[in-house]
Amino acid sequence: MSPLQDLPAPNRRLFLRTLLGAGAALGLGACTSAAASGPALSADAALPTEVPSGTSLRIASSLGAQQLQLQLSGLIRQIPFDVPSWPNIGAGPDVINAFRANSLDLANNAGIPPIQAHFQGYDARIVAINLTRKPSYLFATKPHSDIQSVAQFAGRKLAFSQGQAQGVVLLRALRQAGLKSSDVQLVPLTSNQFLTALQAGQVDIAPLGIAQAPAYLNQYGADGAHTIATDVVDLLSLLWAPAGVLADSRRAAAIAAFVPIWAKGLVWVYENAPVWEQEYYVKSQKITAEQARQVTALSNKPLLPPSWDEAIAWEQQTVDLLAEGGFVKSFKADVLFDRRFEHLAAAAVPAEYRS
């Protein structure tokens, strides 16, 4: 029997104690190894405008996407600091662990990982925002499923990752359908376990990214697997970094220099969709050209707002939603944002990508 099979719904207190305990252990290790490479920078000090020679950042590149995007666009040549590694780290819990272990300086995630990190007592800040107006996830059923709507999730086993965007999308969809988390069976998994759990029938439903869904349906659609689309969005795609990194003047300067490059990279992908489909989805992710076109058709146009007010309000709603379910304690979401960086992404792109 697979270790994932017939998992019970999560005991919230036990689940959170496990996360906190693991985080504390990693944090102790990080305390002995973390060292600032430049003069200290207070949280209210102006950002440095020059990147000192010899500065480096380790930037997450989940499935190689960030690095490839910058290589194809030529923007990688504009990075004014060293990038000794582009770790293949994408899932929120993995990013938090890498931050704690002092093995990663900057990552791209959704809105939930910074909330989870804060709840675990780890201090990290959001430094760039991209708003997504269209759904980024679809709810996929196991093979031979008769579920056709979110309302039919009641009493079913749902793959649930508390520390990732997929978890919040699921909670928002349940609320929209008039269901509470207690009305379903939440099976605690990380997103990289979702496909295996679906394929084996260990969960009835799992939220899959739009890039994952075509390949899953191609393999299991003939067996009755299908997707359930909703209008539930995960508004935030963001860059974030440990507070300790931002307190290092060298690395803070490097991040400030990288944010505009990141923003331009998003625009390049949107404006060069056929190239991205072929070079990333077909060559790297091994999906067909038609599936790649389906993915990009569902993708969001970059939206890099000059004000973060909407993003902060959305993050507060997410905190409140998680607190209502007993997953976190409520707090003011604005503490997650370092607004010194607020203007950088918007200033780097044409007006059509700002609103």
Image (spheres, helix red, strand yellow):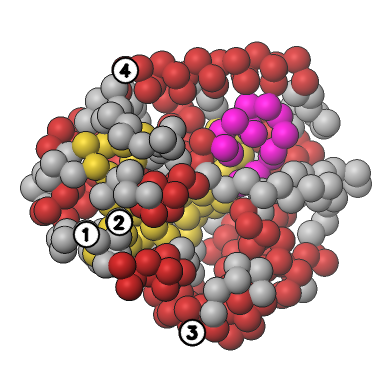
Q: Residue at x 43, y 79 (%)?
A: 294
Mark 3 sits on what residue? 290
Mark 4 sits on what residue? 13
Q: Residue at x 60, y 15 (%)?
A: 25
Q: Residues within 10 Å of mark 3 (few under 14, many from 20)?
A: few
* Image height of 89 relative to 125, above or below: below
Mark 1 sits on what residue? 145
Left or right: residue 274 versus residue 163 is right
Q: Quadrant of residue 147?
A: bottom left
Mark 2 sits on what residue? 142
- In 3D space, how far apart are the residues under numbered discs 3 and 1 (Cα atoms)? 25 Å
- In 3D space, how far apart are the residues under numbered discs 1 and 4 (Cα atoms)? 31 Å
Amino acid type indicated by mark 4: Arg
Q: Nearer the viewer, mark 3 or mark 1?
A: 1
Amino acid type indicated by mark 2: Lys
Left or right: residue 83 versus residue 1 is right
Which element carries disc 1, helix, strand or loop? loop
Q: Nearer the viewer, mark 2 or mark 3?
A: 2
Contact (CB < 8 A) between labels 1 and 4? Answer: no
Q: Nearest the camera: 231 or 279? A: 279
Which element carries disc 3, helix, strand or loop? helix
Q: Residue at x 43, y 37 (%)?
A: 2
